[in-house]
Amino acid sequence: MTRNGGASKGSKAESCAFMGRLDVLTTAIYPHELAQEDEGDSPPPFSLTSFSAVLSALAGIVNLSGHVFRPLVVVCLSALVVLGIARNYCIATGLALLVHRTFFDGRLEELKRLSHLRPGLHCGRTARTDAIVSMVPALQHPHYKGTPWIIGGDLATLYPFLAFRSLAFHVPVVKYARRWLSVDADDTRNNGTKAQKAGGGNGSNGGIGVNHGFSDSLDGFTPCGETPSATGAVPSAANGHGTGDDGKGLDNSDDKEAVALDIALPDTGLDPDKPFYLVLHGLTGGSAEPYVLDFVAHALRRGCGLCVMISRGCMGTPVRGDNFFHGARISDVRSTVTALRRSLPEHTPLVMVGYSMGGIIATNYAALTGENSGVSCCVSMSGSFDTRTNIESRHSQQVWQPLLAMALKEHFVLSNTREIVKRGLNVSAIEACKNVLDIDTHLVAPYNGYPDVMAYYADMSAAAGDKIAGLRTPTLAVTSLDDPIMTADGSPVAEIDTINNLFILLTRNGGHVGWPTGWNPNRNRWGWMSTTSLDFCEAVVATAGL
């Protein structure tokens, strides 16, 4: 394996060939709206909404801690973070004071409930799994060494969220090339999931690129710097679907939606022998999330290309139809995998890395698709195998979910009020939702036709029913036992000996999408997460013949 700036066989010609093939299947412009021009620059400073969200999360912790003087500390710390004038050690010291009691009191019940789970690596023993473990330091004892002065999962989550974001300008600027992929507008449930339909007929894209669904042929490829012509698109007669083309490359048929793909390629060019990464971000996130930028920067330094799939309606992307993002939909991932697989060289490994909700979707996708996943391996960071177990987490619902609920309302409720009313849902009840469980119960589940929230959670969970038995893609799931947002309960540790492709790493601490390391965690930020994911994927690719 080539790591950390080793010799690369990447070439500009390979990059051009990949983008040329991808341009046959996608378009660079969304109808009536130009793609974002910042293309992955560091995220903007905290807005007033972000300030309120941070304040809400910290205030929840204060309510559990029971000290009357702490609200003033919370306000001061939040203001300092927003203004960008506080040193991170000062922030961490204050946050440690705030969450100290919460860790010992608010989390005690959670830790007792997880007492049956043993920290460490859980996986079956085969020649290949042993080889993979030997090549990935994080899969070997002691697995993860955290920051000594960060106490508990709340702080391990809060500190990266606040401090590392204020250091986002230290992350190398990532230049993304945005493409729009035509996908099925509605694919609500995974029981009897509809197959991805081919796209529309011919049409010119105004010299940008064309997207008329998928073709088994890549004849539309053109050299870098040129534009695929309309004649290089999939003809309507070949796919039997109406045109629906808006004249700019996207299928505007009623049963079609557009998903944004942000592509990043190394400066040295694409190396077809190295893994190409499909990244799934967390709830309401996107390609500009600092932890995503951290991973992208690490992968680019190793000479690997990446694609960040933006979930419907996230990162300011428009939703043309009335079916916005929900956690059980895997059809968008399937469409993206298909497009990437047909654009990359045949022997290039395509691998998937998901964070939080993206990790849930990644493992569910791998379990449902079995041998037809189209990816060589899968990594889930802070995901959950069974989201139904989160219902029992009082700490998550009271402290952290109010923050997430606020973001969900801002991203999805306000822009879809008309359709919500049309489907007979109570907008007042939705506006009164205080946590994610409430929103899923009153909005997401009934909006998407589920009889109740438990059915929705089962549909999105890889460990629900017997889905996990169908896993054929080597998969690493990393979860912290002190994760305050996503409980590790439900991890199929008991069945691990019967699933040779599954690696479950349970760390004693680390929080949610956190895992800070060293006495000065600012230096490495999300480095442990990024390195672990990259090492595992490279090890899986290197041991493919075993």
Image (cartoon, rainbow, N blue to C red):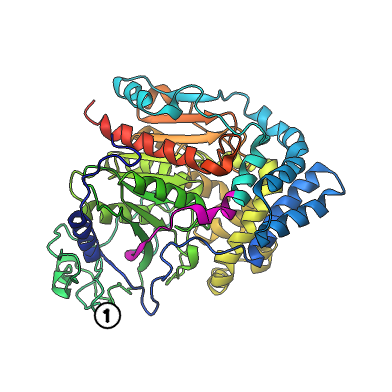
Q: Residue 472: in sight, yes or no?
A: no
Going 34% across and 58% down the picture, which residue do you hit? 263
The residue positioned farthest toward the right in the image shown: 68
Percent x, y of residue 114 = 62, 29
Image position of 123 with respect to 446: above or below: above
Which quadrant is home to the N terminus? top left
The residue to which callout 1 is attached is 247
Image position of 133 with respect to 369: above or below: above
Percent x, y of residue 442 = 62, 58
Q: In the picture provided, is 421 more to the left or to the right than 29? A: right
Going 44% across and 59% down the picture, which residue do you hit? 311
Percent x, y of residue 199 = 25, 67
Going 65% across and 29% down the picture, which residue do you hit? 113
**493 inside magenta stretch:** no
**174 inside magenta stretch:** yes
Q: In the picture provided, is 153 more to the left or to the right than 281? A: right
Q: Nearer the viewer, residue 391 or 153?
A: 153
Q: Residue 333: in sight, yes or no?
A: yes
Which quadrant is home to the C terminus? top left
Query: How many numbered discs, if any?
Result: 1
Percent x, y of residue 206 = 25, 80
Residue range in magenta is 164-182
Q: Nearer the viewer, residue 406 or 78?
A: 78
Q: In the picture provided, is 67 more to the left or to the right than 470? A: right
Q: Which image quadrant for residue 78?
A: bottom right
Amino acid on which disc 1 is placed? Gly
